[in-house]
Amino acid sequence: MITNLLVLFSRRLNQLSGLLAMLLIGYLLCHILLEITLRLFGTSTYVLDEFVGYAIATITFLGLGYSLENNGLIKVNILSDHLPEKHHWLLDLIISFLTFSLFSWISYYWYFNVSRSFKRNITSESIAETPLWIPESMVLIGLGILCFTLFVRMFLLISTRQPPNAETLK
């Protein structure tokens, strides 16, 4: 029961973050087209590089959990090809745990970076003077979603003793 709830919540959270990443891609297209049009008339938004950079970082980190859940990340089968299939879940569990540990550590320190930017009111050096805690917090949210997805994946691996596939996650 709890496994199904965790998987469902993780799936919905990843769908939401994937949708937000998709919308940001649409934003990128619109901002670039606006910039091209404005430059034809000798003006600019003056923030294209900055905002596109923030959007790409956000898209990257918000999309990680969704990509993991849908087996969209690159997977190298060097080790699993040499193991009996009944042990693939154990290798997946070990790799998921190591990845979870690494990204949890990164998230922990990134949180301090976001917190410092917020407390010190650090802004970008551009004309927009964007408070840096805003794009930094979007990266932190993406890291948190990835860690949660990895946690659910480990929980699922332990409870089913099979690598997650499309049927397991639905």
Image (cartoon, rainbow, N blue to C red):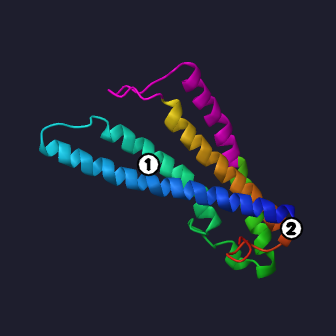
Could you tell me which residue is drawn at 29 percent across and 49 percent down? 32
Q: Quadrant of residue 149?
A: bottom right
Q: Amino acid at mark 1?
A: Ile
Left-right relation of 128 to 77: left
Whole-percent x, y for residue 8 in the image: 73, 63
Please state which of residues 125 and 46 is positioned toward the viewer in this rendering.
46
- View extreme (left): residue: 41
Left-right relation of 11 to 63: right
Say the numbered circle drawn on residue 56. Answer: 1
Whole-percent x, y for residue 103 in the image: 66, 47
Is residue 3 visible to us here? yes
Could you tell me which residue is drawn at 69 percent across and 41 percent down? 105
The stretch in magenta equals 102-131
Could you tell me which residue is drawn at 36 percent across and 28 percent down? 128
Disc 1, disc 2: CB below 8 Å?
A: no
Left-right relation of 30 to 143: left
Is residue 94 visible to us here? no
Task: Find disc 2 in the rendering and name its residue.
Answer: 159
